[in-house]
Amino acid sequence: MIRPEIRDGAFTVTVCTNRMLDNLGMSSKKWEAVDGMDDLIEANEEQTINDICKHAVELAIADHRILIEQVGVPQSAAKIAAKKAW
């Protein structure tokens, strides 16, 4: 999940990887956040919104790749699969 927000007057993006618990993928009604895969990106004056969004997508893909690897898929194949999912 990538969620942009305004917090205390500043642009932020939350990247949280969720595990679906009912085998329904994006249609899932039951999920949980994966431990350690919840990041908050806070903008600074040097970054553009595009920079922050690009970083958020990179974090999401990296987390997804790690989950794919945890079920035994080699890193190179997991990276390709994660990129295709996003």
Image (spheres, rainbow, N blue to C red):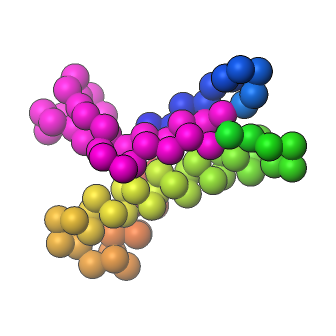
Kindly indicate the quadrant of the structure image that contains residue 58. bottom right
Instruction: Give the residue at x 75% y 28%.
Output: 10
Q: Which residues fall within the magenta stretch?
A: 12-41
* Residue 81 visible, this orientation: no
Instruction: Give the residue at x 36% y 63%.
Output: 65
Quarter of the figure with the N terminus: top left
Whole-percent x, y for residue 63 in the image? 40, 56
Instruction: Give the residue at x 20% y 26%.
Output: 30
Q: Nearer the viewer, residue 16 or 74?
A: 16
| Position of residue 14 in the picture relative to residue 64 (left or right) | right
> Compared to 46, does 16 lie above or below?
above
> Compared to 59, does 45 lie above or below?
above
Residue 22 lies in the magenta stretch: yes
Q: Main secondary structure of the magenta part?
A: strand
**Furthest residue toward left:** 22
| Position of residue 82 in the picture relative to residue 21 (left or right) | right
Whole-percent x, y for residue 80 in the image? 41, 69
Whole-percent x, y for residue 82 in the image? 39, 60
